[in-house]
Structures are given as structure tokens and as C-alpha cells.
Amino acid sequence: MVTGVKKVVKKGLIGGMSFAKEAGAINWFPGHMAAATRAIRNRLKLSDLVIEVRDARIPLSSANEDLQPQLSAKRRIIALNKKDLANPNVLNKWSHYFESKKQDCVAINAHSRSSVKKLLDLVEFKLKEVIAREPTLLVMVVGVPNVGKSALINSVHQIAATRFPAQDRLKRATVGPLPGVTQDIAGFKIAHRPSIYVLDSPGVLVPNIPDIETGLKLALSGSVKDSVVGEERLAQYFLAILNTRGTPLHWKYLFEGRNEGSSSHPDSIDKPSYNLKDLRHQRSKQPDSSAVHYVGGVISEVQRSLYTTLSEFDGDTEDENDLECLIEQQFEALQKALKVNTKASSEARLMVSKKFLTLFRTGRLGPFILDDVPETDSSL
């Protein structure tokens, strides 16, 4: 990450929290995660291959560091999920990075069956070398919370349902005896002769995250609850990333030649009352046209406000004090763009932060990758 972001994080701009190295750890380790981590470690010993699911927006930050020594010793495929939310050009660079490390990696959208099928085809290919000597093969899916493991498993289930009759679909794969490990593990059968089962596991994090920036990226992507870090801190951090990268300046083309009196402008239609839910993907039914135009108008105004404040900014985004002033200006601009009319300052900032984070997480502001591609000598 660029110098300006590192400085403001270290300074403690984000929410006034001390982010010094010795005081900056994010602690979020619910009790069930300790037991789940132990179970995962034991089950990994029995697995023939591991699918490690990571968030494509944070290909390194979404790795569970505590499990890496064990995962790297196994046959492993890193599945970069949510590729639809990640910048495809940068994602391609990440793929080349993993290739340089001789690590199998595939970018997927866990909600797409065709995308998941490509992953499963790679799984079967990687297991060819052990097929001759093993009648039953186990593939384990691991990952930190909210990287899309459940969506992946559901897609695997749907694919399995088309391959096998009902009685073969949801068998329990019997594994060898090992002290402290359940001998019967439920799994989805994805191949026959040999039988290949895909096993699920709970999402687990490390007990504490010593690097505050990694913790912020995990929280920004949804792997750590917002309440642990605070929505306002996350919004400030994301604004710092956007500004130091100059991302809003690339939105200029969105406003050039636009007719302010056109029907696409948010003020030219009857607007429904603003609701955060309008910005979320609706699977059950398609939103009506006025809602689509209105949400599109809100997104446009957010992009315009960030472009304007950054383009008119005469400070240095690499200077933490200047960057702090810019972010404060942008919060005021975002309050207008998001039509947050409450008089209470603290309440307004919270509402602005929540809505702004929703725009990022649903991909409405465009595809992003928060992790910078490291040097080739870095660890996975």
C-alpha cells in the first residue's frame, strides 16, 4: 500500500484509535473458532487436496497465516472468489504472481456453476497422480469467514446433484482412525472411480491480527464484523486508499458530456425514499425502473463528489495531515451525495459510512483489489 495510507493508519487517523504496531492488533476470535481450528488441522491430515478460498479483492490478506505451513505442505488450489468484484487487470497480475510461486490458482465466482465446474475440473486433474492407489479421495475447503465458502459448497452440491442419483449424492466418506478426529465426515461426491468427496469447514481467523492494515482489509471485505473496527474507520480507510491511488480521477469520463437535464439524472424522476437495501443485490425480484435509476443516480453523485473533492484538492495525499483534511471534506460531500439529512453529526457520519461501505461491497463503485501485488520473493 502506498506511503500515505500507511502513515495515516500508523498515526491513528482512522477513528482516533492508536494503531501503533505494539497496540494495533485486532482481536476477534469467537470461542467456536478455536475448536474449529483444531478440527481443521486434524482433518487436513486426512485430506488429499485442499481448496483454499480467498477473497479476490485481498488475495494475501484473506489467507489464514496460522494454517499456511500446513496448507502449503498439501496439494493446494487457491480459489480467488468474488472475481466479479475484483479489478480484472490486477487480478491477472495476481494470477501470474501465484504462477511464479508454482502455486495453482484460479479466479472464480462461487455463484456461477460454470466457474465452479472449472475449479472442480482442476481438482480432478490435480488428483490424477493419486487415483491409482486411493479408492476414495478427500478434498477439503478452507478459508477465513465470508470469503464465499458456503456459496462454493452450495454450487458444488448443485453440480453433484446433476452427476449422481440421489442415493449417491450425499454419502458420508469414512476416513481412517485418528485420535481426536471424527471418523465420519459429511461430504459431497463429485466424481466416481475413484470417489472424490468435497468436505466443508467453518471459516476461521487467526486469534489476533497483528498487522492493523491486514485487519482493516479483512473488515472492509466483510471477514471481520464491522462492529469490531467501526464503520467510520473503515470508510475513512477506504477513502484513504481511493485518494492515494487517485481512483476518483479516473471517473472523470463518467461526467463528461452528461446532460444535467436528461432523464438519467436523479432529480428528473420521482425518487423513492432512500433505503440501504436498494443498494443490495435483489435475487427474488427485479427492482422497478425508478429504483434502478435512483440507485444509479446515487452512485453517480458519490463518484462525482469524490472526483470533485480530489481534483480540486491542492494538498499532498502522501502527507497524512493533508489526507486527513481531504477525507473530512469528502465526508461532508458524501453526506450530500447520499442524501443523509440528519442533524446529529455522529449519526450522519455513521449513516454515510454504512451506505458508502455497501456501495463498495456490492461492487457499485467498480471492481477493486486492495492488496498490492508483492515482489516475487514474498510469501503466499
Image (spheres, rainbow, N blue to C red):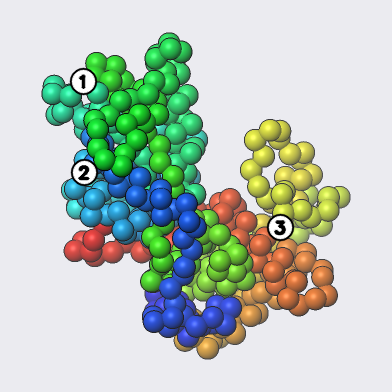
Q: In the image, which disc is placed on residue 135?
A: 1
In terms of sequence position, does the residue under pointer 2 or pointer 1 come before the other?
A: 2
Q: CA distance from mark 1 to mark 3?
A: 56 Å
Residue 150 appears at what percent x and percent y?
48, 39
Q: Quadrant of residue 346?
A: bottom right
Badge 2 vs badge 3, beta-carbon distance below 8 Å: no
Which residue lies under the disc numbered 2? 74
Mark 2 or 3: in front is 2
- Number of dots carrying numbers: 3
In terms of sequence position, does the residue under pointer 1 or pointer 3 come before the other?
A: 1
Q: In the image, which disc is placed on residue 298?
A: 3
Q: Nearer the viewer, residue 152 or 272?
A: 152
In the image, residue 145 sits, relative to residue 218, either above or below, namely above
Name the residue rendered at 63%, 80% in the picture: 328
Name the residue rendered at 28%, 64% in the picture: 374
Quadrant (top left, top right, bottom left, bottom right) of the N terminus: bottom left
Secondary structure type for disc 1 = loop
